[in-house]
Image: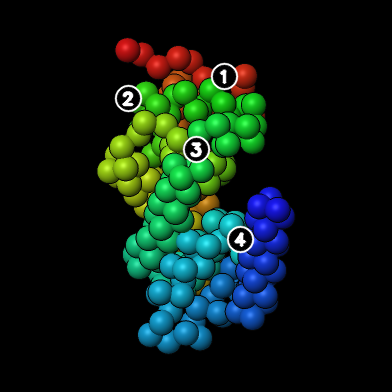
């Protein structure tokens, strides 16, 4: 009976977010984000932060939404608003995972991510979380859930995710602001920035192993020192 209520609740939430997405006119492109947010007037920043925070149930990837934010707000404010939305969703996932419990999460965790669960509980966990959240590609929501069932302190989690969120947000909002400018040179410059953010973490063995593990390209990351 309890499981049936949970299923009904989940279905209702999914339908609700689908209807909300349709009502807001959000599609799978940055221009729809721009059109939706731009029409909100003084409420635009708050609406945008909400879209970023609830992008997963809305069925929108963070990259797309952040690019849209860069088009609307420019690099500086787009970065701040985008990072706020990413941090808000991260905190919700972190607290939800703590409430649900480790056993329930591990049972549903893909095998390739289970070694990361152990890494997240070490002294290097916060740094790894910041790198994973800031990296332009990868399952950042899973990182937040994993952190929630480790011994990581909430303050350390907020700092790590805050730093990573600023990096990810700045990367894509800068790209969006260059698109708005409409200059091919600016777009190429923004593309080079994204490429640099992708490549630089791969130059360091530990972060490279951790990221490749998360992306399913390696069997396991090296064990943390100490």
Which of marks 1 and 2 precedes in the sequence?
Answer: 2
Image quarter hosting the C terminus: top left
Q: For residue 123, which numbered disc appears in the image?
A: 2
Closest to the camera, between mark 1 and mark 4, is 4
| Nearer to us in this view, 198 or 120 | 120
Label 3 crowding class (10 Å Cα cut-off): few <14, some 14-19, many 20+? some
| Nearer to us in this view, 72 or 157 | 157
* Alpha carbon distance from label 2 to label 1: 18 Å
Report if the CB atoms under discs 1 and 4 are less than 8 Å apart. Answer: no
Disc 1: which residue: 220
Disc 4: which residue: 57
* Alpha carbon distance from label 4 to label 2: 32 Å
Q: Is residue 203 above or below residue 53?
A: above
Q: How many marks?
A: 4
Report if the CB atoms under discs 3 and 1 are less than 8 Å apart. Answer: no
The x and y percentages for residue 199 are 50, 35
* Alpha carbon distance from label 1 to label 4: 30 Å
* Alpha carbon distance from label 2 to label 3: 21 Å
Which of marks 2 and 4 precedes in the sequence?
Answer: 4
| Callout 3: SS | loop
Which of marks 4 and 3 precedes in the sequence?
Answer: 4
């Amino acid at each position: 009976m309890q499981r049936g209520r949970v299923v009904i609740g989940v279905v209702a939430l999914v339908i609700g977010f689908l209807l909300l997405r349709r009502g807001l006119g959000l599609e799978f492109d940055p221009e729809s984000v721009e059109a939706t947010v731009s029409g909100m007037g003084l409420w635009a920043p708050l609406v945008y932060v909400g879209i970023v925070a609830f992008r997963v149930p809305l069925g929108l990837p963070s990259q797309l939404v952040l690019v849209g934010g860069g088009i609307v707000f420019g690099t500086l404010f787009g970065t701040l608003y985008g990072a706020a939305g990413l941090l808000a969703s991260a905190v919700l996932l972190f607290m939800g995972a703590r409430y649900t419990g480790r056993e329930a999460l591990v049972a549903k965790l893909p095998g390739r991510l289970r070694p990361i669960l152990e890494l997240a509980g070490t002294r290097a966990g916060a740094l790894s979380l910041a790198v994973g959240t800031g990296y332009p590609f990868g399952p950042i929501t899973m990182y937040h859930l994993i952190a929630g069932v480790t011994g990581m302190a909430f303050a350390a989690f907020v700092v790590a995710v805050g730093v990573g969120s600023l990096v990810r947000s700045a990367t894509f909002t800068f790209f969006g602001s260059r698109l708005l400018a409409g200059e091919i040179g600016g777009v190429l410059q923004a593309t080079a920035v994204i490429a640099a953010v992708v490549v630089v973490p791969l130059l360091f063995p530990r972060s490279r192993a951790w990221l490749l593990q998360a992306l399913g390209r390696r069997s396991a990351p090296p064990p943390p020192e100490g």
